[in-house]
Amino acid sequence: MARRRTGPTDTVRDLVYQRDGGRCVRCDSVHRLTIHHRVNRGMGGARETWINQAHNLLLVCTTCNGWFEDHPKPSYEAGWKVRRPQLPDQVEVRYPDGRVYQLTPDGVRTSVGATR
């Protein structure tokens, strides 16, 4: 029996890759990139329709992906991680250029200013 796919579709992965410029949103690396869920998928979360939409996903390197788990406070402050019950479109994200962006489900990021 084939495993059920619980991650984002290829189309959404491509949107995230393009939106984030093929670079890690924390350190700007172009190496060993992966998709990171801002709100964790665990405990059946993959069944929520928004969990695999672009506003809940970031392109990150594997080093930063691990850093987010080891450093939750700054990760939440920067919007790289989002605590439930907040939704990812309610939390802005800091990018390496020092700007803060609002992300949308359709893969668009809109600048809302500099780091606060």
Image (cartoon, grey):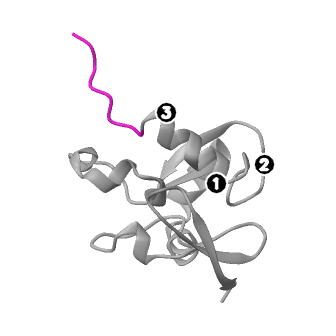
The reply to whether the C-beta atoms of the residues labelled 3 and 1 are less than 8 Å apart is no
Amino acid marked by disc 1: Arg
Q: Is residue 51 magenta?
A: no
Q: Main secondary structure of the magenta part?
A: loop
Horizontal side, residue 96 vs residue 39: left or right: right
Nearer the N terminus, badge 1 or badge 2? 1
Mark-to-mark CA distance, 3 and 1: 14 Å
Residue 8 x, y percent position in the rendering: 42, 40
Horizontal side, residue 34 vs residue 41: left or right: right
Amino acid marked by disc 3: Asp
Residue 39 versus residue 23 in the image, above or below: below
Nearer the N terminus, badge 3 or badge 2? 3
Q: Would you name the residue on which mark 1 appears?
A: 19
Q: Is residue 3 magenta?
A: yes
SS for dot 1: helix
Mark-to-mark CA distance, 1 and 2: 15 Å
Depth order, front residue of 69/17:
17
Horizontal side, residue 101 vs residue 30: left or right: left
Nearer the N terminus, badge 3 or badge 1? 3
Q: Residues within 10 Å of mark 1 (few under 14, many from 20)?
A: some
Residue 95 x, y percent position in the rendering: 69, 67
Q: Would you name the residue on which mark 3 appears?
A: 10
Amino acid marked by disc 2: Ser
Residue 110 lies in quadrant: bottom right
**Residue range highlighted in magenta:** 1-8
